[in-house]
Image: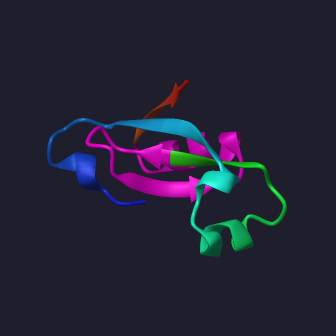
Amino acid sequence: MHDMNAQSGDRTVYVKTIAVTDLPQEVRDQAEGLDQLYAVHDAQGQQLALVGDRKLAFVLARQHDYAPVMVH
């Protein structure tokens, strides 16, 4: 994960569900049969990570000292 929020002091990141069908073909090919992935974005909207499990998205964010919140 990038550390883009460290400069501004904002450690909040946003986790949102992404439909695999909405992703580029090269990413869909790597999705291994999943219907959705979870994207982690900083406050400016930059994608920091894309993972296959919601729990993993939150764990990954916390391991990098971010405060994750789910976006609906």
State the residue in front, 45 or 63.
45
The residue depicted at 40 percent of the width and 44 percent of the height is 65
Task: Determine whether 26 is above or below 32 in the image.
Answer: below
Q: Which quarter of the picture shows residue 54?
A: top right
Looking at the rendering, in which quadrant would you find the C terminus?
A: top right
The residue depicted at 57 percent of the width and 66 percent of the height is 24
> Which of the colour schemes (rainbow, by chain, secondary structure, one colour) is used?
rainbow
Residue 55 image point, x, y percent: 68, 40
Is 26 on the left or on the right of 43, as rendered? right
State the residue in front, 51 or 10.
51
Residue 57 image point, x, y percent: 59, 46
- Outermost residue to the right: 33
Residue stretch rendered in magenta on the structure: 40-65
Task: Determine whether 25 is above or below 9 in the image.
Answer: below
Is 43 on the left or on the right of 57, as rendered? left
The residue depicted at 15 percent of the width and 49 percent of the height is 7
Q: For residue 57: magenta?
A: yes
Q: For residue 26: magenta?
A: no
Task: Determine whether 16 is above or below 33 in the image.
Answer: above
Looking at the rendering, in which quadrant would you find the N terminus?
A: bottom left
